Amino acid sequence: MILPVLNEAEALPWVLERMPPGYLPIVVDNGSTDGSGDVARALGAAVVLESRPGFGAACWAGLQAASDGVVCFMDCDGSLDPSSLPLVAGAVESGDADLVLGRRQPSPGAWPWHARAANRLLAFELRRRTGAKLTDLGPMRAARREGLIGLDLRDRRFGWPLEMVIKSAAAGWRICEVPVPYLPRRGGESKVSGSLKGTLQAVADMGALLR
C-alpha cells in the first residue's frame, strides 16, 4: 500500500488506523516539513524518503520499495477511506482485471468544481484515446507490481496517474473501476484538488503527457 505524502501529519493517524489487515502501508515522504515521516513511523508504517519533488516521483519510489505482488496507491489526505482497498484490489488479486481505479462517490464539500471539471475532461480524453470505459482518474488504484514496473512509467509529476492508464491500455491490460467513497480532506489544503492553482498544474502536466 503506497501512500505518497507531503505535509499530511494531521491526516496520517486517521488513514493508518483504518488500514485493512494484510495491507502494509508504505509512506513516501516527499519533502514534508510538518513531521509527517515521524508521525508515520510512530504509527508503525514503513517510511521511504524521496527528495525529488513530484507526485510521480513519490509513487515511483514507493513502487520500488514495495515487495507484494499486488500494490495499491492512495492519496493520504483523508479523502479516501482505506477500508475500500480490498474492493479495489480484489479484481486484480482474483485475476479478473489488471488495473482497477476507484471511481469517486463524493460526499458534500469533498470535490471542488474546478477539480471535478478537470477530471471529467481528462476522463473523456482517456475514453476517446484508449477505449477504456473510465469516468474518473481514480486516485485509489491497484495493479500488479511487476506489471507496473514493466510499463516503464516516466512522468514524475502529476501526469503519473494518467500515464499509468495510457500505457496499460496500450499494453492490452483489462482496466475497470469500482465506486469508492470520497470525503472532505482532513486538515490543510490539497496539493491538487483543494486549490485552483493545484488543479491547473495537474491539468498542465497531464495535458503535456497527452500531447
Image: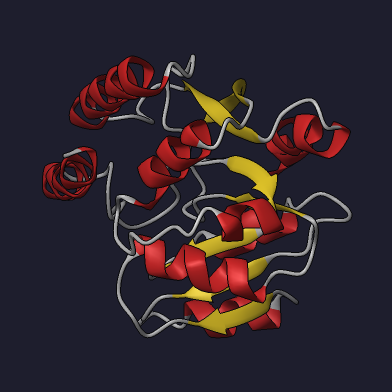
Quarter of image, res 33: bottom left
Q: Can I make out residue 14 in this image?
A: no
| Residue at left offset 49%, top offset 14% | 133
The vertical placement of 82 against 88, above or below, is below
Q: Is residue 189 left or right of residue 99?
A: left
The vertical placement of 133 against 106, above or below, is above
Where does residue 135 sit, x and y in percent of width and height? 42, 17
Where does residue 89 sit, x and y in percent of width and height? 74, 38
Q: Which corner quadrant holds the C terminus?
A: top left
Where does residue 71 sit, x and y in percent of width and height? 70, 54
Q: Which corner quadrant holds the N terminus?
A: bottom right
| Residue at left offset 48%, top offset 19% | 132
Where does residue 48 sit, x and y in percent of width and height? 57, 81
Q: Is residue 126 left or right of residue 39?
A: left
| Residue at left offset 48%, top offset 59% | 152
Residue nearest the observer in this picture, 44 or 68: 68
Quarter of image, res 31: bottom left
| Residue at left offset 56%, top offset 61% | 3
Q: Can I make out residue 207 in this image?
A: yes
The vertical placement of 147 against 81, above or below, is below
Q: How many discs mark residues in the rendered view?
A: 0
